[in-house]
Image (tube, rainbow, N blue to C red):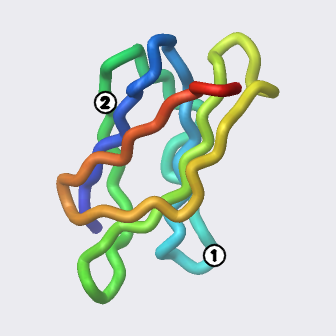
Amino acid sequence: MIGILIENTDTNDLVATVTDMNTVPPTTVATTQRINRGQQFPVNVQEDGSGQALVTVVTAFPNDLTRNKSFPNQSCLAGGIIQVDLFGV
C-alpha cells in the first residue's frame, strides 16, 4: 500500500469518491469525502508492479451529487498528488 493525496483545485468545496483501480475488483477507498477549496486529503491505495497508484476520482458539489465530474485512471507514485475540480460542470 502507498499513500497519495487528492487535491481540490476548484474555487468551490467539493466531495470526492476515490476508487483504487489496482485491486481486483476495483475498491472504493473514499466515499463522498469533503475537500474544501485548495485543500487535500490522503488515501492509501495498492501500488502496481512499478510502484504506481491508479485511481478513478469522481467529484461533485456537496449539495448536488448529480452534478459531477470523473477523472478516470489517474496515476502517480507514493506521495503524489491527483488534482481534481468541478470546472465546466
32 left or right of 36? right
User: Does the CB distance between marks 1 and 2 fall below 8 Å?
Assistant: no
Along the line of sight, which residue is nearer the eye, 88 or 25? 88
* Residue 2 in the image: above or below residue 22: above
Residue at x 53% of width, y 64% of height: 73
31 left or right of 11? right
Q: Nearer the viewer, mark 1 or mark 2?
A: 2
Along the line of sight, which residue is nearer the eye, 3 or 57? 57
Q: Which residue is mark 1?
A: 25
Q: Residue furthest left?
A: 79
Residue at x 33% of width, y 33% of height: 41
Residue at x 46% of width, y 37% of height: 84
Q: Residues within 10 Å of mark 1 (few under 14, many from 20)?
A: few
* Residue 71 in the image: above or below residue 39: below
Along the line of sight, which residue is nearer the eye, 47 or 75? 75
Quadrant of residue 67 within the rendered picture: top right
88 left or right of 82? right
Residue 13 percent across, percent down from the top left: 49, 14
Q: Amino acid at mark 1?
A: Pro
Q: Amino acid at mark 2?
A: Gln
Q: Residue furthest front?
A: 88
Give whichever of discs 1 and 2 has the lower sequence position.
1
Q: CA distance from mark 1 to mark 2?
A: 26 Å
Mark 1: which secondary structure? loop
* Quadrant including the N terminus: bottom left
Residue 89 percent across, percent down from the top left: 70, 26
Q: Which residue is mark 2?
A: 40
* Residue 39 in the image: above or below residue 44: above
